[in-house]
Image (cartoon, grey):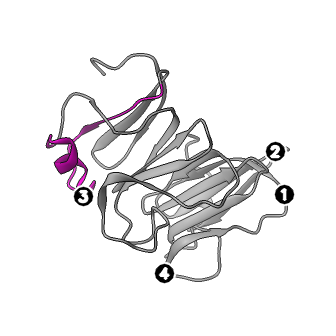
């Protein structure tokens, strides 16, 4: 990507990309109407070149269909875009172009991942918070539909990393095992690791 160097993390949403650089800045580019409000805030529509987002100290980014999460070095998560299904964990508030706090508990977060319309966060102790669409049980909780604020996932062991897809999720445990949940078990075998 021209103009983008020293990248430490990158992800793709629907028709857009987001990156974190070594200096702690976060950048977005591409065209999408799904990041509702974001481009009006930064004053650019469908930027072909990266545009800096209004956060700092970012170490990881993750992009869903219409939302973006950014993790800072203090273990806090900020998000933009759609919260219609609870993607940002703020109770299904209207979409936002400004960074909002994503309330994944009080413990420091060490890893984040988004699916198409859901989000996950791993705590320093290996617990997993989930929020958003659960239409295909991609959150790993019993209630179908939407989970508008984060809930802890009941896993029997600590997790080091999570990965969300359209309708499924996987986790890598601290012992190296893989757990998966959501739509059709065969589909879990083709998820890519982020």
**How far apart are the alpha carbons under marks 1 and 4?**
26 Å
Q: Tell me what residue is drawn at x 62 percent, y 44 percent.
A: 75
User: Image check: 3 left or right of 160?
Assistant: left
Report if the CB atoms under discs 1 and 2 are less than 8 Å apart: yes
Secondary structure state at the residue bearing disc 2: loop
Residue at horizontal 47 percent and vertical 50 percent from the top:
78
Mark 1 burial class by Cα count in 10 Å: few <14, some 14-19, many 20+:
few
Q: Name the residue tied to disc 1.
A: 157
Residue 145's disc number: 4
Of residues 134 and 83, which is closer to you in this image?
83
Give SS at disc 4: loop
Q: Quadrant of residue 93?
A: bottom left
| Separation of residues labelled 1 and 3 (CA atoms) | 37 Å
Which of pointers 1 and 3 lies earlier in the amino acid sequence? Answer: 3
Q: Residue at x 41, y 72 (%)?
A: 85
- Residue 174 tag number: 2
| Rendered view: 144 above or below 192 | below
Residue in front for this viewpoint, 103 or 82 = 103
Front-most of residues 106 and 6: 106
Is tag 1's residue or tag 2's residue first in the polypeptide sequence?
1
The crowd level at tag 4 (other Cα within 10 Å; few <14, some 14-19, many 20+) is few
Q: Are marks 1 and 3 in contact (CB under 8 Å)?
A: no
What is the x, y in percent for residue 44?
15, 40
188 left or right of 94?
right
Please provide the residue range marked out in magenta: 24-45
């Amino acid at each position: 990507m021209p103009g983008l160097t020293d990248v430490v993390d990158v992800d793709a949403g629907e028709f857009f990309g987001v990156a974190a650089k070594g200096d702690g800045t976060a950048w977005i580019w591409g065209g999408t109407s799904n990041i509702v409000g974001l481009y009006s805030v930064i004053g650019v529509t469908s930027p072909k070149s990266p545009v800096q987002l209004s956060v700092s100290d970012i170490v990881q980014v993750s992009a869903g269909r219409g939302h973006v999460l950014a993790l800072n070095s203090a273990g806090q998560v900020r998000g933009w875009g759609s919260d219609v299904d609870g993607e940002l964990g703020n109770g299904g508030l209207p979409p936002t172009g400004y960074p909002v706090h994503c309330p994944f508990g009080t413990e420091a977060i060490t890893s984040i991942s988004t699916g198409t319309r859901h989000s996950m966060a791993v705590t320093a102790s290996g617990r997993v918070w989930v929020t958003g669409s659960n239409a295909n049980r991609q959150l790993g909780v019993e209630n179908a539909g939407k989970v508008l604020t984060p809930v802890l996932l009941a896993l029997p062991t600590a997790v080091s990393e999570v990965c969300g897809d359209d309708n499924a999720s996987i986790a890598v445990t601290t012992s190296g095992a893989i757990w998966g949940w959501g739509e059709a078990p065969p589909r879990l075998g083709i998820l890519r690791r982020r």
